[in-house]
């Protein structure tokens, strides 16, 4: 593959920008990336979304917590794509892997400010463990559960009750790049046609799946997917869908969605009302072989080891940056606090996320594992990223 050229195009006004631009200042429309040199070349040794790195933007470091490759379950004559099986229980983890890779590659020491958006914010804060300062901006603190605020603080973020503009909103081109990998997984499994029913609160997931289909077509792949954005009766159709051709809209009554929510719960799938509406819309449509995207669990979110130890992890990253590499024991000694077991566990989580790298050295007859920060010119943050 040659040198990648990245441009950003606004779906609202068709304005084109060089490089990655997070929002369109001209019209406020939805921006998407236009990548050169894409090809369908699966990295089968990567059990996460980076197996599709040839179809995604390139970074110096790649972060993963094992997102993607979510199961596809048969449901009568249809299929369900269970996105609630991602690390934090939400499809947003796909976006977080791309966004955190971008921030850690661009400037790992720069603060990140995030405009609050429920599942997305929790997911991204969980992934931004290598960033020393993460701030979540809440426009309306009374619209958020106290437990949600406490969980973000537990993950190491600071919470600011302000209407000040945040650096990052949910609707950005890197979110779309991460979420589009959902359709790549269908394609890899040999599913190339059919209607895909997507819950649409903001419309970003439907646009992302549409973008993944368009990217596959752009490289000459034969795909016959149709995207159907599902919304609940009484909900406003997301304005983001207005200028995207190729996405149909389907409305479902709340009563029918609730029945499907209960039906899914009896099969062991606990999701949200809008997600259950996707299944109802698919069954009302009746086309065999259709796929419903089940996006998130309505039960308590999963807490990741790397998130639990976020303050410890940040201190380890600071020590490695200031004083070079070392064994887990040496790092523990330099810290002067925490438990040795905690340091071992945190290093293991950070290595799996691509935040630290390791190698083995030999002293006499003794082999020891040394941890260090990945080189800035490395193309992978870890062996399984």
Image: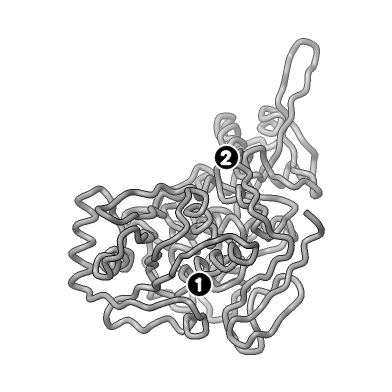
| Closer to the camera in the image, 167 or 22 | 22
| Closer to the camera in the image, 171 or 287 | 287
Residue 77 position in % (x across, y down): 27, 55
Which residue is denoted by mark 2 in the rendering? Answer: 349
Q: Quadrant of residue 119?
A: bottom left
Looking at the image, residue 239 sits to the left or right of residue 165; the answer is: left
Query: Measuring 80% from the left and 16% from the top, which residue is drawn there?
Result: 363
Q: Are marks 1 and 2 in contact (CB under 8 Å)?
A: no
Query: Measuring 81% from the left and 59% from the top, which residue is drawn there?
Result: 3
Can residue 152 be seen at all in this image of the molecule?
no
Query: Measuring 54% from the left and 73% from the top, which residue is drawn there?
Result: 171
Callout 2: few (<14), some (14-19), or many (20+) C-alpha neighbours within 10 Å? many
Sequence order check: which comes first, mark 1 or mark 2? 1
Q: Secondary structure at mark 2?
A: helix
Can residue 241 be seen at all in this image of the molecule?
yes
The label on residue 207 is: 1
Residue 204 position in % (x across, y down): 49, 72
| Closer to the camera in the image, 345 or 180 | 180
Q: Quadrant of residue 214?
A: bottom right
């Amino acid at each position: 593959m040659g040198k990648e050229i990245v441009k950003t195009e606004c779906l609202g006004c068709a304005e084109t920008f060089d490089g990655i631009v997070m929002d369109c200042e001209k019209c406020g429309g939805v921006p998407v990336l236009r990548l050169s040199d894409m090809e369908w070349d699966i990295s089968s040794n990567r059990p996460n979304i980076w197996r599709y790195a040839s179809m995604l933007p390139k970074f110096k470091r790649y972060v993963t917590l094992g997102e993607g490759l979510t199961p596809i379950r048969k449901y009568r004559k249809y299929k369900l794509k269970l996105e609630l099986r991602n690390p934090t229980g939400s499809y947003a983890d796909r976006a977080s892997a791309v966004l955190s890779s971008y921030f850690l590659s661009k400037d790992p020491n720069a603060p990140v400010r995030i405009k609050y958006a429920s599942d997305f914010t929790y997911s991204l804060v969980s992934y931004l463990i290598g960033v020393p300062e993460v701030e979540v901006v809440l426009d309306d603190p009374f619209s958020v559960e106290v437990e949600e605020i406490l969980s973000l603080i537990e993950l190491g973020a600071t919470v600011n009750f302000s209407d000040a503009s945040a650096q990052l909103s949910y609707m950005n081109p890197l979110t779309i790049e991460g979420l589009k990998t959902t359709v790549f997984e269908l394609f890899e499994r040999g599913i190339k046609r059919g209607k895909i029913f997507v819950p649409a609160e903001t419309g970003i997931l439907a646009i992302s799946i549409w973008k993944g289909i368009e990217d596959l077509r752009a490289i000459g792949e034969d795909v016959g997917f149709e995207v159907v954005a599902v919304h609940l009766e009484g909900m406003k159709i997301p304005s983001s869908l207005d200028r995207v051709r190729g996405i149909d809209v389907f409305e479902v009554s709340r009563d029918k969605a609730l029945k499907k929510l209960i039906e899914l719960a009896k099969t062991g799938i606990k999701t949200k009302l809008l997600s259950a509406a996707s299944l109802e819309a698919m069954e009302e449509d009746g086309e065999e072989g259709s796929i419903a995207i089940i996006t998130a669990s309505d039960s308590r979110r999963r807490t990741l080891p790397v998130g639990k130890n976020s303050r410890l992890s940040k201190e380890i990253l600071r020590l490695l940056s200031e004083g070079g590499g070392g064994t887990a024991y040496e790092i523990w000694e330099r810290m002067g606090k925490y438990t040795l077991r905690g340091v071992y566990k945190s290093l293991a989580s950070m290595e799996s996320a691509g935040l630290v790298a390791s190698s083995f050295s030999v002293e006499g007859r003794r082999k020891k594992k040394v941890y260090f920060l990945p080189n800035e010119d490395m193309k992978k943050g870890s062996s399984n990223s």
